[in-house]
Image (cartoon, grey):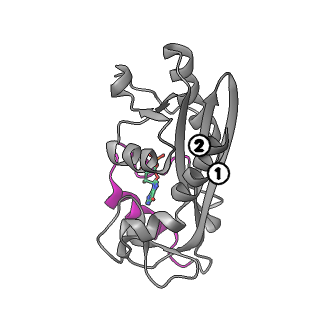
Amino acid sequence: MKLVFATNNIKKLLEVQNMLPKSIELLSLKDINCFDEIDETETTLEGNAKLKANYISEKFGYNCFADDTGLEVDALDGKPGVYSARYAGVPVNSEKNMQKLLSELEGKSNRKAQFRTVICLNLDNKQYLFQGICKGKILHEQKGEKGFGYDPVFKPENYHESFAEMNSEEKNKISHRGLAIQKLVNFLSKN
Ligand code: IMP
């Protein structure tokens, strides 16, 4: 079966392909000649994941899944959430996003936060949602150089290192995206 992953990130695609049974062939947006900019205009992670998956299924007729991720911070009522990428404005800039986050949390003692990934799968005209959550806290300053986005300021629960101090294998085992993908893979392996 051919299945589109609504991404152009080849690293993400290969990682998931390696976890799937050989009978499932993953295709990127480029593979199906989709070069459209799919605007994430919804106000929830679920909404954006559905919007992207539906766009591909409806316009290109493929089974498809799409993901959306946000960082939800307790003391900021769940912000930046669905707006995590553009928190400090556009063009997207991780350094500015982290600086804004640290300054919004200045003087606040509750540093609890979670990363949440939602995957929407459109399979044979049915829709399925999968969620992965990684709980942790926001550090007072950046630690580590690896990863991307908010990794240097996020420390997962029960770990001493920030995400940016872990190698990608360690991070994938416990990360929001890793957990959501694992649920998707388990489902696809059984169905
Ligand atoms: P996306 O939905 O995967 O594009 O994620 C949206 C935004 O959330 C990214 O631009 C990052 O700022 C942030 N983000 C998502 N996943 C991670 C992660 O694993 N570590 C750090 N930041 C992340």
Q: Residue at x 38, y 21 (%)?
A: 32
From the viewer's perspective, is 60 left or right of 183? left
Q: Is residue 174 visible?
A: yes
Q: Are marks 2 and 1 in contact (CB under 8 Å)?
A: yes
Estimate the spatial distance between the alpha carbons at disc 2 and disc 1, rounded to whole Å.
6 Å
Q: Which residue is nearer to you in this view: 35 or 93? A: 35
Circle 2 sits on which residue? 119
Question: Which amino acid is tagged 2?
Answer: Ile
Residue 180 point in image, percent of width and height: 59, 52
Q: Residue at x 56, y 16 (%)?
A: 58
Asked if the stretch drawn in magenta spans residue 165, the answer is no
Q: Image quarter for residue 151?
A: bottom left
Q: Secondary structure at mark 1?
A: strand
Q: Where is 64 relative to 71, above or below?
A: above
**Could you classify mark 2 by the number of other residues whose Cα lies within 10 Å: few (under 14), some (14-19), or many (20 or more)?**
many
What quarter of the picture does the C terminus occupy?
Answer: top right
Q: Tell me the magenta residue range.
A: 82-107
Q: Where is 47 relative to 77, above or below?
A: above
Q: Secondary structure at mark 2?
A: strand
Question: Which amino acid is tagged 1?
Answer: Gln
Q: Which residue is nearer to you in this view: 140 or 189? A: 189
- Which badge, 2 or 1, comes first in the chain's sequence? 2
Q: Residue at x 45, y 67 (%)?
A: 171
Asked if the stretch drawn in magenta spans residue 85, the answer is yes
Q: What mark, if any, has residue 131 been given in the picture? A: 1
Residue 49 point in image, percent of width and height: 57, 37
Number of numbered discs: 2
| Extreme-bottom residue of the structure | 160
Q: Image quarter for residue 142?
A: bottom left
Q: Is residue 44 visible?
A: no
Q: What mark, if any, has residue 38 been given in the picture? A: none
From the viewer's perspective, is 17 left or right of 183? left
